[in-house]
Amino acid sequence: MKTRKYFACSAALLWVLFLPVAEAHPASSTSPSTNREFAHPSEEDKALVRQIRRQLVKTKGIDASNLMVAAKGGTVLVRGAVSDAKQVSRIVDAVRGVPGVKAVVNELIVQPSQ
């Protein structure tokens, strides 16, 4: 049981840190206009996303396993499902605390765990 939990946590961490932005969300759950706005990120945008992902993973009280992060010109899109409203606040605050973030587009959905 511990091995399975460790593997799941490790896989989630790797997904958050290394998954390319273009593959981070299924096409069916995204709006076409938002996808276009954050398409083709610059090297600076990619570096900003990496910084944000690191911050989210190390911030206590945040489960970053179901989050997608994209950036374009300092505007950051955060999308995904979280277990409670407190996580939404923590995530947005953590993202705003990363140098280079000018604005946050919050597309987080609260889905309480079963």
Image (cartoon, rainbow, N blue to C red):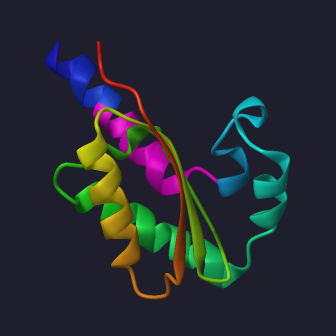
Q: Can you tell which quarter of the image residue 74 is in? A: bottom right
The answer to whether residue 8 is above or below residue 90 is above
The answer to whether residue 55 is above or below residue 78 is below
Q: Nearer the viewer, residue 50 or 34?
A: 34
Q: Please state if 22 lies on the left or on the right of 86 as rendered.
A: right
Q: How many marks?
A: 0
Q: Please state if 77 lies on the left or on the right of 60 as rendered.
A: right
The residue shown at (23%, 29%) is 6
Q: Can you tell which quarter of the image residue 55 is in? A: bottom left
In the image as oriented, which residue stretches furthest toward the bottom?
Answer: 100
Q: Quadrant of the C terminus?
A: top left
The answer to whether residue 27 is above or below residue 86 is above
> Residue 34: x, y in percent?
76, 56
Residue 109 within the segment the image draws in magenta: no
> Residue 70: x, y in percent?
61, 62
> Residue 9: x, y in percent?
30, 34
What kind of secondary structure does the magenta stretch mostly adopt? helix
The residue shown at (33%, 38%) is 10
Residue extent of the magenta highlight: 9-20
Q: Nearer the viewer, residue 87 or 26?
A: 87
Q: Nearer the viewer, residue 58 or 10?
A: 58
Q: Quadrant of the N terminus?
A: top left
Q: Please state if 25 lies on the left or on the right of 97 as rendered.
A: right
